[in-house]
Image (cartoon, helix red, strand yellow):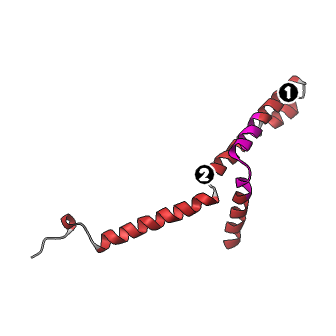
Amino acid sequence: MDELTERKDSYLRMMEKIPTQGYLGLALGSIAASAVLRLAGKKDAALFVGQWPPTFLLFALAHKLLQPSQEQRLLTTREAVRQASQRVSENPPPSSLPPSP
């Protein structure tokens, strides 16, 4: 499992080196290349290249959503929620205390 995490982190670090605009540019470029290939009469090549934009857009989405730098914030948020829950359970608000006999 640790090797899988390292591979994922390595992949995401590699993706971080390419800005999101790069992926969007590749998507638009492949759309334009597909149109040029279609106009040149190369229908099969145009269809092949025309299927690339969704992949590049997914890379851009993954880049935005799964950056390793974001994972640290998520861990910090989880830790903050855990600490807040622990404090509430240690010192419950007065309205939630059971009535004393």
Under circle 1, the secondary element is helix
Q: Position of residue 47 (x, y in %)?
A: 81, 33
Judge left or right: residue 64 versus residue 47: left
Residue drawn 68% across the image and 63% down it? 9
Q: Could you classify mark 2 by the number of other residues whose Cα lies within 10 Å: few (under 14), some (14-19), or many (20 or more)?
A: few
Determine whether 80 is above or below 33 in the image: below
Q: Position of residue 3 (x, y in %)?
A: 71, 71
Mark 1–mark 2 distance (CA, rounded to whole Å): 32 Å
Q: Could you classify mark 1 by the number of other residues whose Cα lies within 10 Å: few (under 14), some (14-19), or many (20 or more)?
A: few
Determine whether 10 is above or below 16 in the image: below
Q: Main secondary structure of the magenta part?
A: helix
Magenta highlight on residue 18 = yes
Residue drawn 61% across the image and 59% down it? 69
Q: Nearer the viewer, residue 24 or 50?
A: 24
Residue drawn 9% across the image and 76% down it? 101
The amino acid on which the numbered mark 1 sits, given as a three-letter code, is Val
Residue drawn 62% across the image and 55% down it? 66
The part of the image, by quadrant, that contains residue 21 is: top right
Boundaries of the magenta span = 14-28
Judge left or right: residue 75 versus residue 49: left
Q: Which residue is mark 2?
A: 65
The part of the image, by quadrant, that contains residue 92 is: bottom left
Disc 1 or 2, which lies upstream in sequence? 1
Under circle 2, the secondary element is helix
Q: Which residue is mark 1?
A: 36
Q: Residue furthest left?
A: 101
- Cβ atoms at labels 1 and 2 below 8 Å apart: no
Q: Position of residue 17 (x, y in %)?
A: 73, 53
The amino acid on which the numbered mark 2 sits, given as a three-letter code, is Leu
Q: Position of residue 91 (x, y in %)?
A: 27, 72
Count of numbered tags:
2
Judge left or right: residue 78 versus residue 70: left
